[in-house]
Image (cartoon, grey):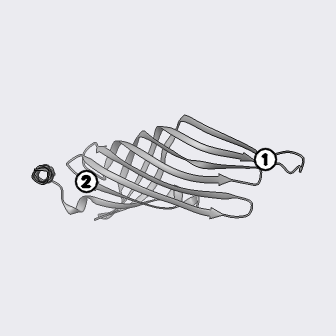
Amino acid sequence: MKKRFFTAFLVSMLASFGGVSAQYSAVRVNALALATGSLNAGIDVAVSRRWSVEGFLLWNPIKADAFRSQVQAFSAGVRRWRFEPHTGFFVGIHSTTAFYDVGGKTAHRKGWMTGAGASCGYSWLLSNRWNITAEAGLGCFYMKEKKQEYNTSVWEDLRIYHFRRFVLAPSRAEISFSYLF
């Protein structure tokens, strides 16, 4: 019974996306994240005339003696395009999960966060296969982290603080280049 229901559901979902062609998929790289040393990649797939789903991975492996910025993040969401996918104005909602280990010689933060946000942006076609997209967004995140403060004095103790909090913060800042296929 469950197999039949799942098969019927899958067939009805595929039938509702009948107007989609393979040309409406895109692979993207965020240039702003690359400027910070973060390796990243995203995919955006059109599922109807004005809707697309997207996923994004980010990894920052920087670790040195004086500074550490290790971040792993995943984001998934949907976008509503004004006219057609990958062209023009869009609004979207997304969820994000990240693990981070950031700090220097005086302070260090380690933890994780998860949350959801909304964004808007615009996509310009550069050629038949390439486009550039600018996007900004705001979100609410739940964070659980541990903060350590290091002191140079041998007479003072190491201070460790534990935080659990909700934060309203920017969730997207993206200038990305996409390849359409």
The alpha-carbon separation of the residues under discs 2 and 1 comes to: 51 Å
Give coordinates of residue 17: x percent, y percent: 16, 51
Q: 18 or 148: nearer the eye?
A: 148
Residue 19 x, y percent position in the rendering: 14, 53
Quarter where residue 145 is shown: top right
**SS label for mark 2:** strand
Q: How crowded is mark 1: few (under 14 residues within 10 Å), some or many (20 or more)?
A: few
**Residue positioned 90% across, 47% down in the render:** 155
Quadrant location of residue 38? bottom right
Secondary structure beneath disc 1?
Answer: loop
Instruction: Tell me residue 173's x, y (percent).
Output: 49, 47
Left or right of residue 19: residue 39: right
Q: Which of 173 and 126 is in front in this view?
A: 173
Disc 1 residue type (three-letter): Leu
Q: Which of 94 and 31 is in front in this view?
A: 94
Q: Which residue is drawn at 62% across and 38% down?
A: 163
Q: In this view, does 87 lie above or below 60?
A: above
Mark 2 surroundings within 10 Å by alpha-carbon count, few (fewer than 14), some (14 through 19), many (20 or more): many
Instruction: Determine which of the numbered discs, if any, sits on residue 147 in the image.
Output: none
| Residue at image point 48% right, 54% down | 73
Percent x, y of residue 7: 12, 54
Q: How many marks?
A: 2
Provide the residue designation for mark 2: 46
Question: Looking at the image, do the residues carrying marks 2 and 1 touch, with CB atoms under 8 Å apart?
Answer: no
Q: Name the residue under label 1.
A: 158
Residue shown at 76% from the left, 54% from the top:
105
Question: Is 159 situated left or right of 156 in this image?
Answer: left
Marks 2 and 1: which is nearer the front? 1
Q: Which of 53 and 146 is in front in this view?
A: 146
Q: Earlier in the sequence, mark 2 or mark 1?
A: 2
Image quadrant holding the C terminus, namely bottom left
Q: What amino acid type is highlighted by mark number 2? A: Ala
